Image (cartoon, rainbow, N blue to C red):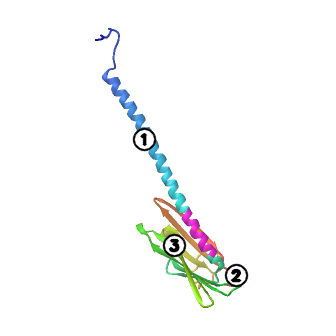
Amino acid sequence: MKRLKKDQRGFTLIELLVVIAITGLITWGITMTIFQVFDINTRSTNRMAAISQLQNAGLWVSNDAQMSQNVTPGGSSGFPLTLTWNEWETGDSHAVNYTLEDMLGGLKELKRSHSVTGGNSTVTTVTHVAEYIDLAGTNCCCDCDGDGYCDDDCNCNAKVLIFTVTATVGEESETRVYKVTPRSGS
């Protein structure tokens, strides 16, 4: 066996405890940094998903509202929203209904039902437009006098349809306001 020389020493218990404590702090710091990166990534992904849903809803409603000759919001939130118009060239009659249907977690799904009547037939298509819609921050209303605000007493021969939509994904929430002018002659 090897013998220790008199001036050769090992680590003391206190030195070992200090090294273990410092290693533990470094490990804790690295772990917290990794968790923060994952949390920021999740929040960013949720925010982008909410924005994507808002853009889809705004695109569909805006396109249909620009074609419409009649705008009829229903209920206190403006849904179901009904947009109707006749095609100039063919005379076909279009009716689009936007509804908010329940999803899990109290959020809503925006659906679009589009019926086209021409000749002796009617064709109806249903499209899933957006999900994660928060009813508390979503509504449709009309601005009949052109002041930029919703009018309660308006019969919706609107100058402007104001569509406010909120999407919530995880804990991230986004809201957009779309102001759309229906087709002239409405």
Spot occupied by residue 179 in the image (x, y as percentages of width and height): 63, 72
**Disc 2 designates what residue?**
184
| Circle 1 Cα neighbour tier, 10 Å, few/some/many (<14 / 14–19 / ≥20) | few
- C-alpha distance separating marks 3 and 1: 40 Å
Residue under the point 60% across and 91% down: 120
**Left or right placement of residue 7 versus residue 181 in this view:** left
**From where the camera sits, is residue 146 visible?**
no
Amino acid type shown at disc 2: Ser
Disc marking residue 110: 3
**Left or right placement of residue 136 versus residue 177 in this view:** left
Of residues 146 and 63, the one drawn nearer to the viewer in this rendering: 63
Mark 2, secondary structure of its residue: loop
**Disc 1 designates what residue?**
31
Instruction: Give the quarter of the figure containing the C terminus.
Output: bottom right
Residue under the point 35% across and 12% down: 8
Spot occupied by residue 28 in the image (x, y as percentages of width and height): 40, 38
Q: Which residues are magenta?
A: 52-63
